[in-house]
Amino acid sequence: MSRLRSWPVSADQSGHIVQAIAHLAAGVAAVSLVSLGGEQIGHPLEPSALPLYYGLGMVSALLPDIDHLSSTLGRQAKWIAIMLLVGVVVAMVTMGPRLPMERVAVLLTILCYYLAAVVGGHRSPWTHSVWPWLGGSIGLTILVPWIQHERGWFYGADDAGLVFAAAYGSHLLLDSFTRQGIPFLWPWVDRRLGFRLVTTGGKPETFVTIFCLGLAVLPLLWP
């Protein structure tokens, strides 16, 4: 373990961030394991929602790296954030009091979180601790049923919170194997936690990617 006060980890300090392909493979594997586990305990994922679940799993597996502007998702997130901010400003100017302020508050909260994550730096507690992991899982568990009831969207995606937890957690797990570790239990533990077994990139990461892809197809092979 290393001292938490060393965060954020910059690209120069860590050499590389774990490649997107490894995190994507881990996210897909996490969804497959949730699907397989659900079948074994009699609570399978809704088959019609599997494409949505796998899409959510891939996005969730990349999400912690929005704090790194050079990451796969980080490059897209900064433009999305800019467009959202411009959209909010334009809507406030053109619609005025007719604008539903609860929606504006939600968008501004998301933008503020994104800004805090970027300013906090790579692998800060904003993205690589228990807080965003639990917050996203609980948030989706509450939000998806509400959207289903109010809008009729995301039919069958009742386990979105569980899928998010598995896929986001897969990212944190992979990063914990690197020598930099993650501040998972911040602020209770003022240290970076992890197994510190490998550096990012190279053969270990390739092996992990292949292993995760093998897990991803496991439901197809399971009798």
Image (cartoon, rainbow, N blue to C red):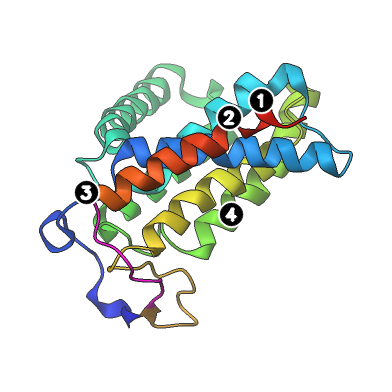
The reply to whether dot 1 and dot 2 touch (C-beta < 8 Å) is: yes
Q: Any mark on residue 220, and which?
A: 1
Q: Answer with mark 2 or mark 4, whichever residue precedes in sequence.
A: 4
Q: Start and end of the magenta stretch?
A: 192-202
The image quadrant where one finds the N terminus is bottom left
- What main secondary structure does the magenta stretch of the protein show? loop
The answer for how far apart the CA atoms under marks 3 and 4 are is 33 Å
The reply to whether dot 3 and dot 4 touch (C-beta < 8 Å) is: no
Residue occupying the point 50% across, 82% down: 188
Q: Which residue bears the numbered disc 2?
A: 217
Q: Residues within 10 Å of mark 3 (few under 14, many from 20)?
A: few
Please identify the quarter of the rendering in which residue 163 is found.
top right
Q: Is residue 66 visible?
A: no
Q: Answer with mark 3 or mark 2, whichever residue precedes in sequence.
A: 3
Q: Is residue 208 above or below residue 172?
A: above
Q: Any mark on residue 135, and which?
A: 4
Q: Amino acid at mark 1?
A: Leu
Q: Position of residue 159 (x, y in %)?
A: 73, 37
